[in-house]
Amino acid sequence: MELLLPNTVYHIYNHSIGNEQLFDAHENYLFFLNKFQRYLSPVAETYSYCLMPNHFHFVVKVRKEYEIVAILPDVYGKKYKNEVSLENKELIVSKYVSRQFSNLFSSYTQAFNKWVKRRGSLFLKNFKRNRVDSREYFVQLVKYVHFNPVKHGFVSKMEDWEFSSYNVMLSTDSTFINRDSLLKMFGGRDNFIETHLAFYSEG
């Protein structure tokens, strides 16, 4: 499985097991986003997301190595400090970032299981991660993430889906999304809207 390398952008996504639902109520979506911020914001910047009833998508950039090293807990920090190999140092940091995702899924699953009175795993074991290696891929990916609810027939317009970052990008409210950097990548707010609308015909 590919490591989550520092200072690198990834498409992170996962699906529920079988026909299970990840989110059973409005509160579940909000709870998951709060958990995401708690576990992932310290180690990654978030550019976009979309939560669907049985799967999710995030576009994130793992923070720089020195930023993550500064917050490593003792068990990881001691290993990093005592390691001589730069490659192994990077491995330690990458494992910690992956561990934060695992902690997110585990914490949410425990709370969700209690909520709906179920038992067992909720997410597929290995979450998917694709490295984003070009500006073109990045822009297309963000549009794809925001278009997902339309693609799956939940809404007819992106702005009608509450649990994605599309409307967040158009507002001025405080957010954990890196709004300024993302809009800059799209050439501004107007072009962000225009290129997203064009994606309807592209999709």
Image (cartoon, rainbow, N blue to C red):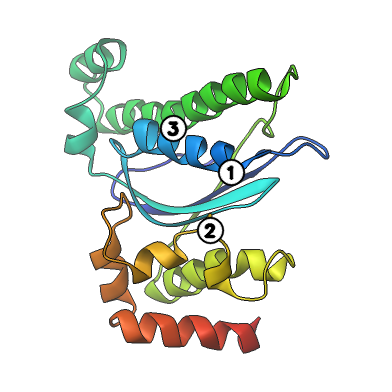
**Along the horizontal axis of the image, is 17 left or right of 50?**
right
List the residue tagged with mark 1: 26
Crowding at dot 1, Cα within 10 Å, few <14 / some 14-19 / many 20+, comes out as few
Tell me the residue at 25%/32% (across/down).
86
Residue in front for this viewpoint, 104 or 6 = 104
Q: Marks 1 and 2, Cα distance to the nearest angstrom? A: 9 Å
Image quarter where the N terminus lies is: top right
Where residue 162 appears, x then y in whole percent? 53, 58
The answer to which of marks 1 and 2 sits earlier in the sequence is 1
Q: Secondary structure at mark 1?
A: helix
Mark before the other along the chain sequence, 3 or 2: 3
Kind of residue sitting beneath label 2? Glu
Q: Secondary structure at mark 3?
A: helix
* Circles 1 and 2 in contact, beta carbons < 8 Å: yes
Would residue 146 appear left or right of 96 to someone viewing this image? right
Between the residue at mark 3 and the residue at mark 2, the CA separation in whole angstroms equals: 18 Å
Pointer 3: residues within 10 angstroms few (<14), some, or many (20+)? some
In the drawing, what numbered circle is on residue 162?
Answer: 2
Residue topped by disc 3? 35
Q: Nearer the viewer, residue 65 or 148?
A: 148
Verify CB contact (< 8 Å) between mark 3 and mark 2. Answer: no
